[in-house]
Image: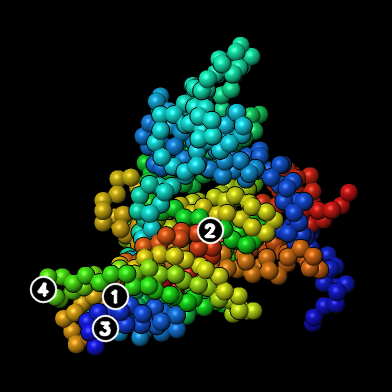
Amino acid sequence: MSRTSEEWRHKPRLPATHYVNSRIYTDEEIHREEIEKIFNKVWLIACHESEMAAKGDFRTFFHPSGRSLIIVRGEDGKVRAFYNTCSHRGNKVVQVPSGNAKRFTCVFHHWSYDATGACVDIPRETAGYGERLCKATVGLREVKCESGLGGFIWVNIDDGCESLGAFVGDALEDLEVELSQPLEVFHYHQAVVETNYKLWHDTNRELYHDYMHYHNRLTGLSQKGYFDRVYHTYPNGHVQLDSMEIQYQAYRGKQRTLTWPGAAAASHKLIDIFPGTTFILRTPSMRIDTMTPLGANRVLIEFRGLGLKSDTPDERAERLKEHNNLWGPFGLNLHEDLHANEMQTEAMRDGVEHAHVLHAREENHTTHDEIGMRQYYAEWGRRMGRSPSDPYRA
Amino acid sequence: MSADREIAELVYQSCFLLDEMNFAGYLELCAPDFRYRIVAYSPELRKDMVWQDVNREDFKHHLDLIPKHVREMVSLSRFPTLYTIRYDNDGKRANVLSGLQVFKTKLDGGETKLYGVCRLHDVVDLTNARPLLAFREVRMETRQLGTGSQIPF
């Protein structure tokens, strides 16, 4: 039976933990608060060590706070991160996404910085500043930076934050062996998608949507063991799903045989790190999603495909092929997920009579249980000081 | 018809058939040893990335699967501009360079936006009754493709 306006707006007869108010996905004020209370406080992946292997190599990273960061490997081999902002007149120091440099010189007035963030040159310093200001006091603003957990470079702009190890805890345990191998990024692309970042991450936290994917219906959903997978929740909002063997032959006529140390051939593992990082191993390749919210209805997602640094050319080609078939910009599966998120946003854009989004499936934490999203919104509510199901309650 | 003209028609026809989602027609333009690649230089990784690299059989498999997958309700319109045709000394093959603009039009409302810019490097086999595509490399200039496209350029 269809519903009237009043019935549509009525709260579901479910525990408040099992649904959210759709306006948490569309309200710009809530979005700004999320940046302040969540993204400015947590560890985020900025890049991977293989993207900056040599001394002097650098990458830039657009942090959700709106700041550009420079990540650089110093002469001492240590990786450090700084605001990409000149101490003089606030100009962006580095304009390119990557490179190798001994110094970073701002094009505006030629103030220069080294890989430790120290200001090493100010043109006509004494003539202009005398004793009132000197290089030693105008270094770049350093940001907490740690390398690890698969060789990723993690940053946190909160000087008082907990350690990366404390933040992630044991959540990556199931990929411990897989991530302990020297890895290499072979694929990188960005997607700006007209959706809320949480809707994208929600999709990575539930497999009920496998019904949408022709590939997943054939290789997973209809296969033995699919419904036996169990979600495990961790402190700080992280979640992990037990692995299963994917039956690729049901889709492509041939099973995948190339393995990954620690994982069986054709295995699928999934771990989500709050608030928006996902590790997916689909042997033979690994995908890491990270994201930067650009507004309540817009998100920049960075997709990385990884292989083993020790791959032979043939092994790399096989990992690439499988990655691209599903997850590349011209792949068949990734588009489906992103398109579904854009449709969600079109349907629930702010100002439209709000509804409730259900996270209510309970199946003993197995494959189609929506515990992954409930775990997320418990953490979201804790950090935001708002109830996801009733976010405007005083 | 001159060889140049036949080759130009092959390039234009290949784009038109993909616009029409006439995949069987597209494959008829391809030689048995056809290879299709999409590549892009990543300034983030400072190296070339391969986004698709398939032989004729794998390409056909990909195209056959598209209708079975969920897809954004849009059409793509390809506008190639042929730059150069260079013939091998023995006249059996030609290397063709074209620019390509791809526009996306929404089914709902009909809005059109520029979606991607790239170059096509084609190798054309001239040893048959008509020119056939032996190799196509799509070198992407645009790397930010939103939700992406299951349909090749």
Residue picked out by circle 2: A191
Query: Judging from the image, what secondary structure is the residue with disc 1 in?
Result: helix
Asked if badge 3 and badge 4 are on a common chain, one would say yes
Q: Amino acid at mark 4?
A: Asp
Residue B138 percent coordinates (x, y): 36, 66
- Label pair 3/1, CB-CB below 8 angstroms: no
The N terminus of chain A is located in which quarter? bottom right
Residue picked out by circle 1: B56
Kindly report the distance in space between the C-alpha atoms of the residues bearing marks 2 and 1: 28 Å
Query: In which image quadrant can residue A134 be found?
Result: top right
Kindly report the distance in space between the C-alpha atoms of the residues bearing marks 3 and 1: 22 Å
Q: Amino acid at mark 3?
A: Glu
Q: Amino acid at mark 1?
A: Arg
Q: Chain of mark 2?
A: A
Query: In which image quadrant can residue A163 be found?
Result: top right
- Label pair 2/4, CB-CB below 8 angstroms: no
Front: mark 2 or 4: 4
Between residue A280 and residue A265, name the one nearer to us. Answer: A280
- Label pair 2/1, CB-CB below 8 angstroms: no
Q: Decide which of tag 3 and tag 1 comes sooner along the chain.
A: 3
Residue picked out by circle 3: B6
Asked if badge 2 and badge 1 are on a common chain, one would say no
Residue visible at 79% across and 44% down? A385
